C-alpha cells in the first residue's frame, strides 16, 4: 500500500482467493513438502502452503515463490 494505493487490499484478496480454492478442493493441488500442498496466488508471485484436513484446511505459510518451499517449516 505504501507504493501503490490499494495494492495491500488486492494482495489480501489474492490470499483469500487462494484459501477458497484450497477449501473448495483440498486435494486438487499436489503435495510439495511432506503432506503440505500449495496453491499459487493470482497476480502476485506468492504461494499459499496448507494442509488438507477433514472439514477444513490449515494454512501454514504464504511465501514469495523465489523462497525455498522447505524454508517455512523452520520458521
Image (cartoon, rainbow, N blue to C red):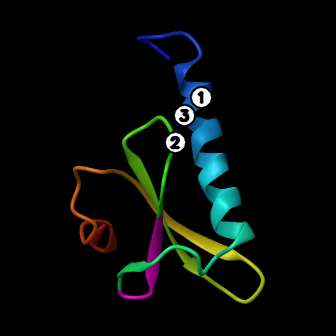
Question: In the drawing, does residue 26 fall left or right of residue 70?
Answer: right
Label 3: how many Cα within 10 Å (few below 14, some 14–19, many 20+): some
Question: In the drawing, does residue 28 fall left or right of residue 38?
Answer: right
Q: Is residue 20 above or below residue 37?
A: above
Q: CA distance from mark 3 to mark 2?
A: 9 Å
As helix, strand or loop, the secondary structure at mark 3 comes to helix
- Disc 3 vs disc 2: which is toward the camera? 2
Residue 55: give x, y in percent of width and height: 78, 83
Label 1: how many Cα within 10 Å (few below 14, some 14–19, many 20+): some
Circles 3 and 1 in contact, beta carbons < 8 Å: yes
- Name which residue lies at 63% across and 66% down: 22
Circles 1 and 2 in contact, beta carbons < 8 Å: no
Residue 19: give x, y in percent of width and height: 64, 58
Residue 13: give x, y in percent of width and height: 65, 37
Residue 31: give x, y in percent of width and height: 42, 81
Q: Is residue 73 above or below residue 43?
A: below
Question: In the drawing, does residue 36 fall left or right of residue 53?
Answer: left
Q: Disc 3 designates what residue?
A: 11
As helix, strand or loop, the secondary structure at mark 2 comes to loop
Q: Main secondary structure of the magenta part?
A: strand
Question: Which mark, residue 62?
Answer: none
Looking at the image, which is closer to me, 57 or 40? Answer: 40
Residue 72 image-quadrant placement: bottom left
As helix, strand or loop, the secondary structure at mark 1 comes to helix
Question: Which mark, residue 42?
Answer: 2
Is residue 37 within the magenta segment?
A: yes
Q: Disc 1 designates what residue?
A: 10
Residue 2 image-quadrant placement: top left
The residue range painted magenta reads 34-38
Amino acid at each position: 500500500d505504501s507504493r501503490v494505493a490499494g495494492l495491500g487490499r488486492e494482495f489480501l484478496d489474492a490470499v483469500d482467493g487462494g484459501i477458497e480454492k484450497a477449501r473448495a478442493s483440498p486435494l486438487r493441488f499436489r503435495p510439495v513438502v511432506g503432506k503440505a500442498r500449495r496453491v499459487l496466488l493470482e497476480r502476485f508471485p506468492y504461494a499459499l502452503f496448507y494442509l488438507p484436513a477433514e472439514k477444513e484446511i490449515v494454512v501454514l505459510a504464504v511465501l514469495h515463490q523465489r523462497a525455498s518451499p522447505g524454508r517455512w517449516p523452520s520458521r
